[in-house]
Image (cartoon, rainbow, N blue to C red):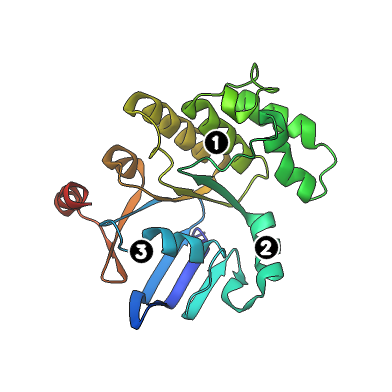
Amino acid sequence: MSTPVVISAVDLVKKVTTGNTQLTILKDLQLAIKAGESVAIVGASGAGKSTLLSILAGLDQPTSGEVILAGQPISHLNEDGRAAVRAQTVGFVFQSFQLLPGLTALENVMLPLELNGVKEAKASAIHWLTQVGLQARLDHYPKQLSGGEQQRVAIARAFVTEPKVLFADEPTGNLDQTTGATIIELLFELNQQHQTTLILVTHDIQLAERCQRQLHLDVGQLHEQTAGKQEEDFAHG
């Protein structure tokens, strides 16, 4: 039996207006990613990688075209509808961690479960913080944690809802090389254990090469990446 497609984009177009100029960021873009795949989206700075990630996750809307996420055509839903699909389907890891400073590590990880009305939020949050090696940091606030520890909290928060798809936008961008390598190992270990589809934007060649596929965003369209071209893109990106 073939692996089902968990996210697809058909004829995706994104245009933005700045001043008197209209820029086309994405142009008739096509994409299909199967359940359990790990996919890196690479390309030069300003190519629209983060914009594409936001549209695929339902955080932003395309100018035209369609995104189907876990069987739901999210491009035609209003914000409440897209938020409901995200809550059931998606986890996020960002470069800037996006932790709430007034909440402890435990409370940050509990939050998405509480918003979804899950009763065993605390037990699940403790489990996931233990999975990422932070069982001794439950009551620490973000400012009391190192960058690597904050990103571990963010990963625990992303996985606590058991998402079908995990989106990661430059997840090692604010970390030193050694800490970044540890975070990479953790992401892929959890990805494989739970068969979560992993879609990430990165300038980190080590991280991109760990993925099963590398897609290069260039002039608004995606192309399957070849090894030689990949080295060139990272040199210029």
Tell me, yes or no, whether the two marked residues, 2 and 3, touch with CB atoms within 8 Å.
Answer: no
Tell me, yes or no, whether the two marked residues, 2 and 1, touch with CB atoms within 8 Å.
Answer: no
| Vertical position of residue 185 compared to residue 66: above or below | above
Q: Position of residue 137 (x, y in %)?
A: 64, 20
Ranked by sequence position, the earlier of labels 1 and 3 is 3
Disc number lying in front (1 or 3): 3
**Toward which corner of the image does residue 211 lie, by quadrant?**
top left
Q: How many neighbours does mark 1 have within 10 angstroms: few (below 14), some (14-19), or many (20 or more)? A: few
Q: Name the foreground residue: 91 vs 225.
A: 91
- Residue on which the image places disc 3: 48
Q: Position of residue 173 (x, y in %)?
A: 38, 40
Q: CA distance from mark 2 to mark 3?
A: 22 Å
- The amino acid type found where label 2 is placed reads Ala
Indicate left or right for 81 with 190 as reference.
right
Q: How many labels sit on residues?
A: 3
The residue at the far top in this view is 136
- Residue on which the image places disc 2: 83
Q: CA distance from mark 1 to mark 3?
A: 31 Å
- Dot 2: element: helix
